[in-house]
Image (spheres, rainbow, N blue to C red):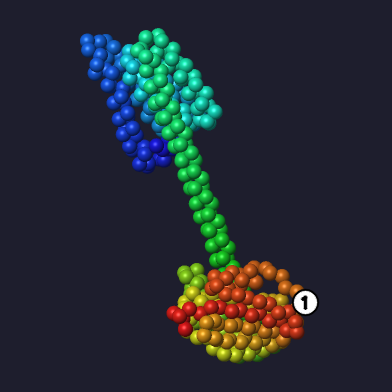
Amino acid sequence: MTLGLTIPNEKSYEQKTAWVYLINLGFYFIPLYFMHGQWLNITIAILLLVPFIIGYFWAYNCSKERAVKPIGLMFVTAIASSFVSSGAISLFSFCCFFIGFFYSLRTAILSFIGLSILLLVIDISMDYTGYFFTFYGMGICLGVGVFGIIEQNRQRIKRQQQQSKDEVANLATALERERIGRDLHDVMGHHLAAIALKAELADKLIASGKIDLAQQQIHQVSVITRDCLSQIRHTVSGYKHQGLTHTLNTLANTLRDNAIAVSIEGTFPKLSELMESQISLLLTELINNTIKHSHATHCTLRIEQSPNCLKLNFIENVPVKTITKGNGLTGIQERVTLLHGTIDYQLIPHYKVSIQLPLSESVR
């Protein structure tokens, strides 16, 4: 059963089937069948079911903090009915279930001991034969109470699992947002740097009266801006792009605009869309890092293909003393990991980034 859980406008399957468990009240009616001529006691026993059922559904949809009142109502009803019918044992079993479900094991054990004493007192008072009321009642209440404890543990595990799922979902959402932020940073970083450089150059050309050259730079700013917008749209919609060839040409022009010569050796084979998009973004970040942090005057991108892997070597013509992994290198590492590849750095005599990516049969 699912208890203490109410969802607005939506009831769980267990809540909808709460009536099913009342079938156990059949044991309450069996002794009434044999009470020939005791119409007063039979009537009182049936009437006492009204407050008991009210307490049952009250407890069924109640929280632990408020469960005392409905359980108390059920318990008082069970005591009252025990003086008119031995079938009251079944009512006590319902009380034991809720006690086992809502409260600690220690409270459940103490409650069972107290209930056993109460059953013995009622047995003696009613002079039932052979103490069956006490022993049968203890057995039934113990079994149903244990079931309540088991159900409490099941519900607790279920809540913990749901909480874990929610935490994983929240973490995945946060990581996805961070990844999208890095992707946009990778795409926009070198474009914005190129736009700023060309705008500054155009301003100087205008100041020196070289209008034609300034117009060329402004036109290139327009081209870069449209390309940046296109890449952002593709990145957000599915990390698509206009192809590695287009990306390499754009990145090479960006390096040359920053007075860095570039050589591209080799060509890319036909790759999957995922590999193309991730390689495009990691190359973008490599070039962006070179423009922002390096003193290199020449860069080489060497593309090598073997039967089982694709090798990328990005080499600057200057050494590097140390590297600090910020968002850029972290993003590159994550993309390489996504493609099940490896990455190595060489600092001297030239700064070199070596990336190896496995090729599947579908992309060769």
Determine if residue 336 is in view. yes
SS at circle 1: loop
Left or right relative to 315: residue 71: left
The correct choice, above or below, for 242 with respect to 59 in the image is below
Determine if residue 199 is in view. no
* Residue 280 percent coordinates (x, y): 55, 78
Amino acid at the residue labelled 1: Lys
Residue designated by label 1: 321
Place residue 318 in its image quadrant: bottom right
* Residue 266 percent coordinates (x, y): 57, 90
User: Which of the two residues, 364 or 269, is positioned nearer the viewer here?
Assistant: 364
Rendered residue at 52%/50% (across/down): 164
The N terminus lies in quadrant: top left
Rendered residue at 55%/72% (across/down): 340
User: Which of the two residues, 131 or 76, is positioned nearer the viewer here?
Assistant: 131
User: Which of the two residues, 61 or 99, is positioned nearer the viewer here?
Assistant: 99
The correct choice, above or below, for 300 with respect to 139 in the image is below
The correct choice, above or below, for 78 with respect to 238 in the image is above
User: Which of the two residues, 139 or 274, is positioned nearer the viewer here?
Assistant: 139
Rendered residue at 24%/18% (across/down): 33
- Label 1 crowd bin: few (<14), some (14–19), many (20+), radius 10 Å: few
